[in-house]
Image (cartoon, rainbow, N blue to C red):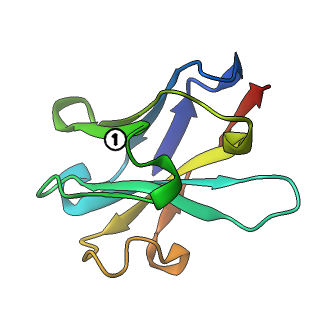
């Protein structure tokens, strides 16, 4: 059974930090890219960051560059998203997803991801 389980969300003040985790199981982790997406109330789902487990190439959306860092622990099939200097506009439900052997031009395409987690709420107060 494929599972993606997110953890680490919560309530934090602006300027604070959180680290999200995405624990994967049920598929060959090294063959997949893991992406973090977020959806704020009333908005569409947005690609935040992605890392390819097979070559460790990364992607960040412009609004989080310099503040968020994605990393992959292939030994434990887990991807982390370290979020620093959080802003109220970062408030959203954050979900991780797995897509097989994605190339850099497709990492933001939601339709290219095969498996999704349930999501974890991140709330940043001003």
Q: What residue would you read off at disc 1?
A: 70
* Residue at 48%, 48% in the rendered image: 64
* Residue at 74%, 68% in the rendered image: 44
Residue 59 locus on image (x, y percent) = 33, 59
Tell me: 28 left or right of 110. Answer: left
Q: Is residue 1 visible?
A: no
* Residue at 88%, 61% in the rendered image: 42
Disc 1 secondary structure class = strand
Query: Which quarter of the rendering shows the C terminus?
Result: top right
Residue 103 locus on image (x, y percent) = 25, 77
Residue 55 locus on image (x, y percent) = 11, 57
* Number of residues whose C-alpha sits closer than 10 Å to that of mark 1, classed few (under 14), some (14–19) or many (20 or more): many
* Residue at 62%, 45% in the rendered image: 94
Residue 74 locus on image (x, y percent) = 19, 38
Q: Is residue 14 visible?
A: yes
Nearer to me, 6 or 83 = 83
């Amino acid at each position: 059974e494929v599972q993606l389980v997110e953890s680490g969300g919560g309530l934090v003040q602006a300027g604070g930090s959180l680290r999200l985790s995405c624990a994967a199981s049920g598929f060959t982790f090294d063959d997949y890219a893991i992406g973090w997406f977020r959806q704020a109330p009333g908005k569409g789902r947005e690609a935040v960051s992605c890392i390819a487990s097979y070559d460790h190439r990364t992607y960040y959306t412009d609004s989080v560059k310099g503040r968020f860092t994605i990393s992959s622990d292939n030994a434990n099939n887990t991807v982390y998203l370290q979020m620093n200097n959080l802003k109220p506009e970062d408030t959203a439900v954050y979900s991780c997803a797995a897509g097989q052997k994605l190339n850099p031009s497709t990492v933001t395409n939601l339709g290219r991801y095969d498996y999704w987690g349930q999501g974890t709420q991140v709330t940043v107060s001003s």
